[in-house]
Image (cartoon, grey):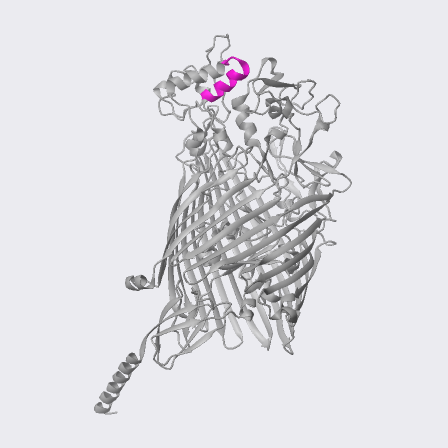
Amino acid sequence: MNFKLKIFMVAMLLVNIQLFAQDTYDLSGTVTDANNVPIPGANILVANTTRGTQSDFDGNFTIQVASGDIVRISYIGYSTQNVAIVAQKTVTVTLTEDASQLDEVVVVGYGTQKKSTITGSISKVTNETLDQIAVSRVDDALIGQVSGVNIQATNAEAGGAPTITIRGIGSVTADSGPALVIDGVVVSSDFLGNLDMNDVESFEVLKDAASAAIYGSEGSNGVILITTKSGKAGKTKFSYQTYTGIKSAHGSDDYRKSVADWAAIELDATGTLSNETQYAQLLVKATGVDRDWQDVFFDGGTITSHSLSARGGSEDTKFSTSLRYLHDEGVVITDDYKLFSANMKVDSKIGEKARFGIRATPSYTKQRRLPTSIHNPTRQSPWLPIYHTEESLQFINRDVYPDVGVGDYFYENHLVELDVNGDGNDSRPRTSGDSNPYAQYVEREHFEYNTKLFGSTYLSYELLDGLTAKTSLGVTLEQRKRTRYDGVLNHASGNSRAAYYLANRFRTRVISDNTLNYTKTFNDDHDLNLLLGATIQKRTSEESITTGSGFSNDLLKNFQGATLVDLPTEINTELRKLGYFARVNYAYKGKYLVNASFRRDGSSVFGIDSKWGNFPAVSLGWNVAKENFLLDSDAVNTLKFRASYGLTGAENFNVGDDIVNAWPYLALLQNSNSIDNGSIAAGVSPLNIANTLLQWEASKELTIGLDYGFFGNVVSGSIDYYKRTSDELLLNNPVSYISGFNSGIVNLGEVENRGFELELRTRNVSNEKFSWNSTIIASTNANELLSFGDSNNALIEDDYGRNSQWINRIGEPISSFWGYVVDEEAFDETSFRTTYVDSPWNRINGQSDDTIVKDLNGDGLITEEDKTILGSPYPDLVYSFTNEFKIGDFDFSFMVQGSLGAQVNNIGDQYFYNWFGNRTRSGGELEAVANGLVSDVSFIQEKVLTSDVIASADYFSLRNVNLGYNLPNDVTDRIGVAGLRVYATAQNLLYITADDYHGFNPEHIDGSNPRAYGSQRAGTPIFRTVTFGLNVDF
């Protein structure tokens, strides 16, 4: 080719490029629905290219086009529109609802299903509903969003997970939380703490057995399906979300008592002041310290979050990646939580028939945990200084503590005993016995480090038209390290408790699912879907625990600084499961619906004769709105009756020992050392009683429901009634002492949960300039024990040494509170009431006519026979009311949420009032009580439960308030971004509790005993949060 020809070809290429550049231009447009309401997030793609974008909050978009292009506009639930480009510069696109598209977006177990053909009880929550809420955990965003789901802030520490229950608690020892499925793979429930809300596309909650039975034992308490965001074809979209906020505790005015307050109470009750009280007054006068410990410990906190994501791809391969950093400071001193996480998701189309996907989510958390329950500092004496001053040193017992100086921690044992009131008896001021609470928190460094990796991959192939095979693999790896260093300055009664604790745990979870799915429509009237599958799962846990003590200083906060190191304890467990499942869905003309499924699971938890459990389910539906007599109705859009019945099982129980939990049917051994002639002799001893007859807990559930939508779905929602009966409960049951054990695991008992659920959604106003939507969610639940073997009831030991505080009694809720009823009429506001006891800390054998508890059986004595049920820890009603407004570029929403009918055993009252409100009279036999302010100290020292510390757990909260503003397009265009939203949000601005509740958090539960539900010494307080955030799209 000669030089001139080359020049000519280059010139022609340049001309063509210039002509092409002249032919492309920016097309501006708006996407709306049939009511002229803008549709944000609609996908706009130039066909056969990679040029694409999305509509902004006002439905507007800009994209580069050329004459002859076809622009495709799509949005979930609407028919796709194709716009031919001739030479227009602007376009308005109106999308119309597509019923078939609406049906396709509902995710069910191991697949998807048309919304109109669903016969189970399934609730869906989309990211559009939740993206205005700034939360550190995704489960917090679900509060008040779904009927039948109760989410309690049982752990209000920074990064703390709430407790989630669906349709009540049906087991005494088994885990009551729902299964969690991320993009089709079952994962551990604690994975929710590592998931970024900005990565979530939608939640589907499977509430009834017919929906959840396909997951077998995993679905015994319901299932939460989470679908994460995927990339979309077109230009890569970058997003940055950040928010920062301040947190403050909802304290308790009932626990704010100064020395002057207690002196007034004592003076009114007895007419005199004790030596202890006068000594406290002397200290207050000298040091000026008369504090409310809440002001010290509830110092508030901040929360900061940064998220960066990139999503995009082509028609064949789509990707989504994100990074997140979260720093959450708790409202209690030393409470701190940091999270680093990432997410990567790729979905690819290989040819016309194959699909491949991979996902990885690594995370790392560092948390400084609270070293003790918050009841320790809040019950401490108000006169106690944190550090010594010149004023406090004049009261030091120098014979015992000659070296104590200014700036040292103050301990009550430092004080010299004095006779202040001149009665001839020396004493110190009364304290709680918890030493210096500030030193307990600061000098005890309790950390937890978690490194996690969740990964999954899948491959699907369309074998025939409508027949698809799919295999998936999910892997979860978790490394947890817990360290507890109690420094040499952490004293109890003036003595150092320096110690180090180290626990390392490594857990794995591998699950493989393999399915065949067949979908076919016959003669346009018969819709059939068949599913066959098998799943295999293996979980392992390896844990080692080592402790050391005898530290002389804090320079080496490890075992090198200890003078005594105990032998390590190792706990290794393994669980294997194998399952087979099948499901058939059939719909005739979309009107008459049948769904049937079967799951068979085998678990290594049970012996050979009971290893397998069978879980069938069936559900029926009638789409009345599709009948001819309603087909053309403008008033009725959706009217579907549903009924379902199914069985699920449980084997994930907790009886207090991980080894026994894993192999309860085997006779297990444990290391057991003894002393032989002054030397340690190693040996083994039995760990448990074997029970080869153990079998699955089984739950049978009936649900009857109605889905409705009227007047163009302006009013829509659902109503459900359910009754779930759980039997063959797995629990520890007392056995004869000659066995050498106190209890053994058996299948015993039957419990029922029943209730109603309501979801009501209304579009009150909907136009281009203003919209207003409302949602009401309400759920009731009644829990009842139906049988308990050969016994009518069984007492439950607690973890506080207070004898039995709970009871399982036929006809009552499980784990009901059990104790004495206080005789309210016997109270006198100006005097003491008394009761006689054998001696402090022994069982009551009262004989006084002046007793303040009721003699229910009328025998003249206060004995065990006078105990009764005092309440239930389960709410009768959980509700929420949400309103969402859009005014131009502004959006505003709020939710009120609450709970009614539950009681709480507020042990914090006993601790607090015992130390401050009572004084012991001569001999220790006669205990006094100041009415209305304190509990009877004899019952506290006897460690039994009385009705005056059973309080209502009712609460009403302004759970969320959100105000946002989306910058107009002309502004975002000038600053070079695709979209920008600024917002302010608040949680728990208002939180009202019942008058008789004196604590910090009625939702809190001390979770050390799964059978003893609803008790708290003093939970980490509910807190209000105010945050300011920014979302930017590029």
User: Residue at coordinates 43% horizontally, 69% vertically from top-left?
Assistant: 43
**Picture mark count:** 0
Indicate yes or no whether the magenta region holds residue 264: yes
**Quadrant containing the C terminus in the rendered view:** bottom left
Q: Where residue 136 sits: x, y (%)?
A: 45, 49
Q: Which residues are magenta?
A: 259-274
Residue 669 vertical position relative to residue 624 in the rendered view, above or below: above
Asked whether 168 or 94 is in front, the reply is: 94
Q: Quadrant of residue 470?
A: bottom right
Q: Where residue 988 sits: x, y (%)?
A: 47, 43
Residue 53 vertical position relative to residue 664 in the rendered view, above or below: below
Indicate yes or no whether the magenta region holds residue 468: no
Query: Going by the picture, which residue comes out furthest to the right?
Result: 790
User: Residue at coordinates 37% horizontally, 71% vertically from top-left?
Assistant: 29
Q: Quadrant of residue 836?
A: top right
**Quadrant containing the N terminus in the rendered view:** bottom left
Q: Main secondary structure of the magenta part?
A: helix
Asked whether 748 or 132 is in front, the reply is: 132
Residue 196 visible? The answer is no
Query: Going by the picture, which residue comes out furthest to the front?
Result: 634
Residue 980 vertical position relative to residue 64 in the rendered view, above or below: above
Q: Where residue 915 sits: x, y (%)?
A: 53, 23
Asked whether 317 or 277 is in front, the reply is: 277
